[in-house]
Image (cartoon, rainbow, N blue to C red):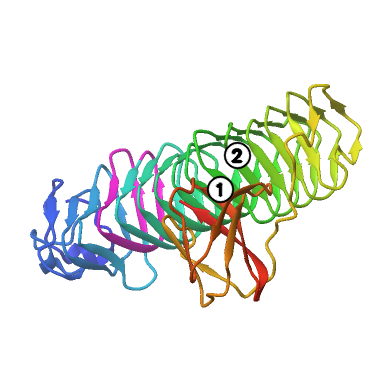
Amino acid sequence: MKKRLLPFCFLAVTASAQQTIHSVSNGAATNPFIWDCLCFPTTDDIIYVDHQVTMDVDWAITSGGKIEVSAGASLVQDVSRQLLVDGAGSQLVIIGTAGFTDIAFTNGASGSNTGQFSVDRGLYFASGTTFTNSTTISGIDSLLTEGTFTNSGNFYAGNFLNTGTFTNTGHIAADSMGNTGTFNANGGYLTIATFGSTGTFNMANNGFMDVSGNWYNAGDFTIANGLSVFVGGNAYTGDTLGGSALLTNNGAMAVTGDFASSDDVNGSGDICVGNDSYNVGVISGTLDFCDATGSDFDLNLGTIAGTVTYCTSGCSLGITEETTTVSVYPNPASTLLTVAGNTAFETARFYTTAGSLVKEITLSGNAIDLLGMPKGLYLIELDGTQVEKSTVRVIVE
């Protein structure tokens, strides 16, 4: 007879071989009468949750076992519960709704989410594990990925660290994000409070990064043509521990605060800096650099190639968010944006994060039509003869 998950499970009637088990009614997971086997499933069974099942016990999936939560069904904890998915072939598949306090994938396990997945505290993917998310994961306090994670949906985390291989075409929001592995930002957008990377970070195809605080690179960071990084605080690229850092910018980088480099910066894009700028490294390529306080670097103790230009593309960080009671919704938005409770604004001007005017719209009422606006991050300046000018940051998706 197989080892049971918990001591009370010895009371359940089970078979000695792996079973395929379906739920037959709503109820608690420890109630054998909700399963068609009239048993408590063991850790290596193939389990299909087809009803509203309450996870009233910590659970494990091992030895090629599987839990699949069907469309319209749910597997949700009653109180604080943990789930372990362990071993090659072991799987968690969420098509319906699932929610736990902590969950870990280890030793080659895998999972996927095309439904609604919530994690109250910790979500961990060990080396060798794989996971795909195409819808929404919510409520994560801490996320650590050492395996392979592919995201085309949305997830929100307090602290997010990638040490494995992460590929993103969706939306990631985090209070802090760190990368020591390989992060492929192949689309979508990242909205982060603070960011740091010592690994490889590639922005390609489409999308953007919005960092409201400080940005740090001690690895290899690439911004492809047409893509942008906005930094609301300070930006630093360099390795203070004796390694080498590289920032390749073929798109646009706008830094509201200070910009400093102690290693290599190259590319064919634009760098716009709102405050002080320092270089003790090597600046090369056909970059156009513009410091709003004086065009070129405030302090240069390094090397700057003769192919680097200054302010030929323009640099206007004067369009900044102001402290205001004005709000807009939804944000992100795709077709229509509403100014909450205010119909007095007459004009909406869309600016890139570097300050370039993209579009000006005459308003009628409090609705802003986003039809034809490319995806991206914009600062929208709202103006009117009877109201004070206000600026809000909006994501168009």
Q: Residues within 10 Å of mark 2 (few under 14, many from 20)?
A: some
Give the mark nearest the N terminus, 2 or 1.
1
Question: Label 2 sits on what residue type?
Answer: Thr
Give residue 381's mark: none
The residue tagged with tag 1: helix, strand or loop?
Answer: strand
**Range drawn in magenta:** 83-108
Q: Position of residue 285 (x, y in %)?
A: 73, 23
Question: Label 1 sits on what residue type?
Answer: Leu
Residue 285 vs 297, above or below: the answer is: above
Instruction: Write down the residue under mark 2.
Output: 180
Left or right: where 227 falls relative to 262? left
| Residue at mark 2 to residue at mark 1: CA–CA distance | 8 Å
The residue tagged with tag 2: helix, strand or loop?
Answer: loop
- Residue at the spot x=28%, y=39% of the render? 89
- Residue at the spot x=55%, y=40% of the render? 163
Occupied quadrant, residue 307: top right
Marks 1 and 2: in contact by CB < 8 Å?
A: yes
Closest to the observer, 171 or 122: 171
Instruction: Write down the residue under mark 1.
Output: 161
Residue 380 vs 206, above or below: the answer is: below
Residue 114 vs 263, above or below: the answer is: below
Q: Position of residue 196 (x, y in %)?
A: 66, 46
- Residue at the spot x=82%, y=30% of the render? 281
Classified by dominant secondary structure, the portion drawn in magenta counts as: strand
Q: Position of residue 168 (x, y in %)?
A: 46, 41
